[in-house]
Image (cartoon, rainbow, N blue to C red):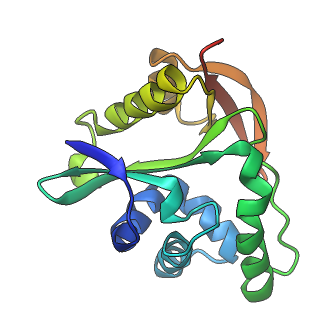
Amino acid sequence: MNIRKAKISDSKYIAPILLLAMEEIIYKFIAKKDYAAAKDFLQYFIERENNQYSYENCFVAEEKNEIIGAVNIYNGADLIALRTPIVEYVRQNHNPEFDPELETRSGEFYIDSLGVNPNYQGKGIGSKILLFLIEEYVHQNKQTLGLLVEEDNPLAKNLYLKLGFKVAGDKTLVGKKLEHLQIGPQL
């Protein structure tokens, strides 16, 4: 398996994989429970630069020239600038009252979403992607990584804790209560 920075040509493969991790949140963004519309929404932004879901902020895991996993990560200090095009688009096209909470901030690189193709789940792909990020950001660049995990997802939380993440508090995103976990050189 190879993990590399995503390219714009990867966008149509990244969208359904990341949507696995954020389907309910995107439904709230677009104000309807419509898988095709959610995938199209996500792909629209992945294909574009300078937004939080851009391919510029993604890594992909590939095996035999097939993208089998993807992760979206960016500097928390950049959230407002990266989110602005998405908020404006959602307000104009789906929900004029859209005003999501800030899920990250300065001081961490935020793992926004991570997904693995269902045909490859349960094979350690997600763990390998996380270990890659920990090596790249924490060990090599002395940065802190942060992520949010749903309280009703103990398997994911246990994986993160096993890899060295620590509970850093609680957050709310589009009305959903989540736990904030971090791993860093000083944690």
Of all residues, the one furthest to the left in this rendering is: 64
Write the residue at 63% across / 38% down.
109
Where the N terminus falls, by quadrant?
A: top left
* x and y percentages locating residue 70 in the rendered image: 39, 52
**Residue 121 vs residue 54: left or right?**
left
Position above or below: 142 against 173: above
Where the C terminus falls, by quadrant?
A: top right
Of all residues, the one furthest to the bottom in this rendering is: 93
Q: Is residue 103 shown to the viewer in this render?
A: no
**Residue 60 vs residue 168: left or right?**
left
Is residue 140 or residue 37 the one in the foreground?
140
**Residue 73 vs residue 174: left or right?**
left
Q: Is residue 14 shown to the viewer in this render?
A: yes
Is residue 33 or residue 13 the one in the foreground?
13
Write the residue at 36% across / 31% down.
127
Write the residue at 29% across / 38% down.
125
**Residue 169 vs residue 155: left or right?**
right
Of all residues, the one furthest to the top in this rendering is: 186
* x and y percentages locating residue 79 in the rendered image: 74, 53
* x and y percentages locating residue 182 in the rendered image: 63, 25
* x and y percentages locating residue 154 in the rendered image: 52, 28
Write the residue at 38% across / 32% down.
132
